[in-house]
Image (spheres, grey):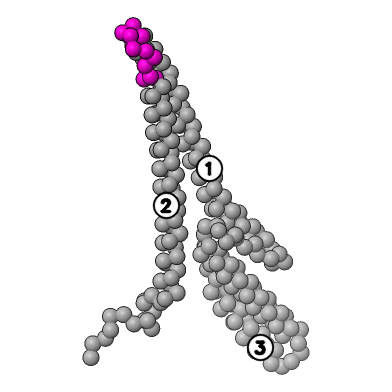
Amino acid sequence: MTKALYSPADKGGMNQVENNEICATDQETLARFKQFALIALLIGLAAAIVLGGLVYFLGAESGGSYTEMIKAHWLTRSHLVPALWVAGLFMLSLAAMITGMISLYSSFRVAGPLYRFARNLEVSENHSIIGIRDGDCLQDVSRQLLDSIQTLKQHRQLIRELTDKAEHCLQSNNENAAAEYAALIKQLTARIARVNVS
């Protein structure tokens, strides 16, 4: 009998939830690319309008006689360089402003979660964990960090319980206290040995 190439029960196989998460991430990325493409198109359109307006106003003829045509050509030629400088600086400042707004928006979506991660690592166990906003980036990292913090809290709680039991065994006058203490110390040593701090 041949084995099927894909089985949902396989550990390496992808289930429907994972597939939906990947598709949702791809849709978000596609939406961002569409936004950036739209912004680039608008900047290009603005550049074309400015250049077209510049050519129109500098190339407008003010009469039909030969003298007026030469005078208009001379004015166009003498004002072409400053007009191109003004148009170029306008387009450069417009593109810089739009790029700055995009980077500011993007940095808030990344800087906000990074600040919250730092605060979550700084706060003591008495404070609650600060979550990130729904629209922020790094949602997966946030979930992993919160899971790690929760696991660490459980680990600390278990160590605290084991040390309290060990202290209680030391203060006890029971004849089995020494064996119980040794077993607790063994558990505590094994528990601490599982944590790798590098």
Q: Is residue 65 shown in magenta?
A: yes
Given the image, on which type of amino acid does mark 1 rest? Answer: Met
**Residue flagged by tag 3: what amino acid is it?**
Glu
Mark 1, residue position = 101
Q: Is residue 110 above or below residue 87?
A: below
Residue type at mark 2 is Lys
Of the image marks 1 and 3, the number of the one nearer the N terminus: 1
Classify 10 Å Cα crowding around label 2: few (below 14), some (14-19), many (20 and above).
few
Q: Residue furthest bottom?
A: 175
Identify the residue shown where x is 34% and y is 12%.
64
Q: How crowded is mark 3: few (under 14 residues within 10 Å), some or many (20 or more)?
A: some
Secondary structure type for disc 3: helix
The residue shown at (60%, 59%) is 133
Residue 59 locus on image (x, y percent): 36, 20
Magenta span of residues: 58-70
* Sequence-first tag of 3 and 2: 2
Q: Residue at the spot x=72%, y=66% of the render? A: 126
In the rendered image, the vertical position of residue 100 relative to residue 120, given as above or below: above
